[in-house]
Image (cartoon, rainbow, N blue to C red):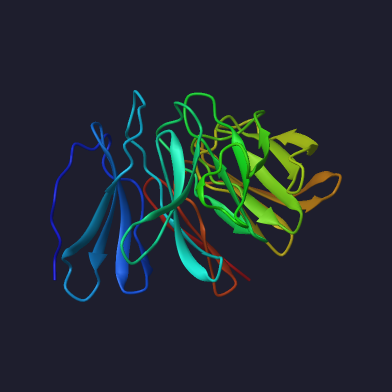
Amino acid sequence: WRYHDSYPAMHGNGGSPVLVEGVLIFSADGEKKGLLRALDVSSGKLKWEVNRNQDVRRKFSFGTPLIVESGGEKVVVSQGSGMVGGYRPADGKLIWWVEYGEGFSLVPRPVYQEGHVYLTTGFMKAKLLAIRLDGAKGEITDTHVEWVSTKDIPTTPSFVISGDEIYVTDDTGRLSCLSRKTGERLWRDSYKRKISASLTLVDNRLFAFSEEGQGFVHKVSDKGIEEIAVNDFAEPVFASPIIFDGSVIVRSKSNLWRFGN
């Protein structure tokens, strides 16, 4: 089957679909409406559509939904301009939501860890939120947001979580390690390069790729980072890397690279 539809998107769709319980779910947050859609995976027909109905100036966003297990059932965590919601996969029912003002153009993916969802709030001044999902029903902005961080938070690259640490770089390359439980910044460093590709952590090695074309590999610890390698691709890197079969696969502007032993 093939599904074709159009909506007034800004810069295209941008997000990726997710598959859960026989439905394919994707964001369609355009210039005029913030929508979440679900297709029947067997037929490709539209099963349900949800309008976020947020009273925000800029409704376009590019979020990729996240599937989590909460309260004994699967929940679709989906961000749009001004809010994030938890939706039921079968019919799109909104179970809970958090509002974050005029935040728009969401790109970084949310991350789930130990009953919490961690996410950023988009342009113009991004924040990082920690949201507890236990008992989440209705609007939980004032009851379940455990902490908010406002310094050096990205609008484009996604962050990574390992144990009780969050590694996050803003778009200018300022790297921070935050406590996952409190949001406190444990240390700070800088790549001194613009970053759009998402951070990737493998075996305590942190990979970052710059818009100028450098690839950084650092060992991380509770005190900071230690340089292992720096590679120059001689052309910009915007895409996030893939870890596959012991290798790192990177797409630069004109080439595809694979690094391994």
Q: Position of residue 149 (x, y in %)?
A: 67, 33
Q: Position of residue 233 (x, y in %)?
A: 51, 46
In the visual, does 11 lie left or right of 249? left
Is residue 23 or residue 234 the one in the foreground? 23
Is residue 98 or residue 161 the one in the foreground? 98
Observer able to see residue 156: yes
Is residue 214 or residue 239 the one in the foreground? 239
Vertical arrangement, residue 153 with respect to residue 74, above or below? above
Vertical arrangement, residue 114 with respect to residue 108, above or below? below
- Residue at x 42%, y 55% (from the top left corner): 65
Q: Position of residue 127 (x, y in %)?
A: 59, 32
**The N terminus: image quadrant:** bottom left
- Residue at x 51%, y 56% (from the top left corner): 241
Q: Position of residue 138 (x, y in %)?
A: 49, 47
- Residue at x 35%, y 33% (from the top left corner): 54
- Residue at x 64%, y 59% (from the top left corner): 115
Is residue 123 or residue 223 the one in the foreground? 123
Vertical arrangement, residue 83 with respect to residue 163, above or below? above
- How many marks do you count on the picture? 0
**The C terminus: image quadrant:** bottom right
In the visual, does 121 lie left or right of 184? left
Specify the quadrant of the image occupied by residue 235.
Answer: top left
Observer able to see residue 236: no
